Amino acid sequence: MKYFWHFVISIGVLAIILFSFFGASLSFGNKIQYTDQNPITEPSVTFIDPSLGKTDARVTLITYGDYGCDSCATLDEALVTLAADDFPNDIRIVWKDMPNVSQHPEALNAAIAARCAEDQGKFWEYHTLLMTNHALLNAELYTAIAEQLELKTNVFASCLKDQTPSPIIQQTYEEGLKLGVSATPTIFINGVRYSGALDIGTLKSVIRQALAE
């Protein structure tokens, strides 16, 4: 009889523990928030986003761009100049892929090529050369740039063929859609949205204003 009551008590304790565990699990589960159900007002910056400049820079410029876009190339050149000459310690440039294949058929392939170069630590060098040659995007150009930058061409070619970076590009593209980005380039300067290729004078003015705030 004594063992019977020990068994009953043990079952009761086990039941309480299991009930508490599943109750806690349910409580935590109900607190999960899914990004897709929440509105987005500003872009995120994570490890998947190539950036140039100090991570603690006072001004962050996030560009949603397309490698086949004339205005994107113009903006990119202006940003690189400002980062090198005018605000070397104050701005951080972040790139977000937003390929518009309906207007620029090679935009996605170019984005994949740049990300394949990123895997070998040469994103910005590759990115700049793509922008410089944005009117000539094709498979031969991607290989030529890889060779010029002395990438491991077999690794690069495999990455390009398998389209390995596609999920990352898709993620930034979808983020742009959620933000209502409908044209490239679209740039966020400390969270404030600007569309089109801002000229270098306007960029300087906006950056100085942001630094003064």
Image: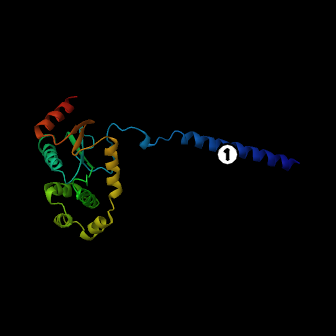
Of 155 and 109, the residue lying toward us:
109
Residue for badge 1: 18
Q: In this view, does 17 lie above or below 213?
A: below
Of 190 and 185, the residue lying toward us:
185
User: Residue placed at 22% from the left, 66% from the top?
Assistant: 151
User: Residue placed at 20% from the left, 55% from the top?
Assistant: 127
What kind of element bears circle 1?
helix
Where residue 24 sits, quadrant-wise, is top right
Residue at the far right: name it. Answer: 1
Residue 67 image offset from top left, x and y in percent: 20, 54
The crowding category of the residue bearing disc 1, from other C-alpha atoms within 10 Å (few below 14, some 14 to 19, many at least 20), is few
Give amino acid for label 1: Leu
Of 79 and 108, the residue lying toward us:
108
Pick the quarter of the image with the C terminus.
top left
Is residue 15 left or right of 97 when viewed as pictured? right
Residue at the far bottom: name it. Answer: 154
Residue 157 visible, this angle: yes
Residue 37 image offset from top left, x and y in percent: 44, 40
Residue 132 image offset from top left, x and y in percent: 13, 55
Where residue 202 sits, quadrant-wise, is top left
Residue 6 image offset from top left, x and y in percent: 81, 47
Residue 190 visible, this angle: no
Where residue 200 sits, quadrant-wise, is top left
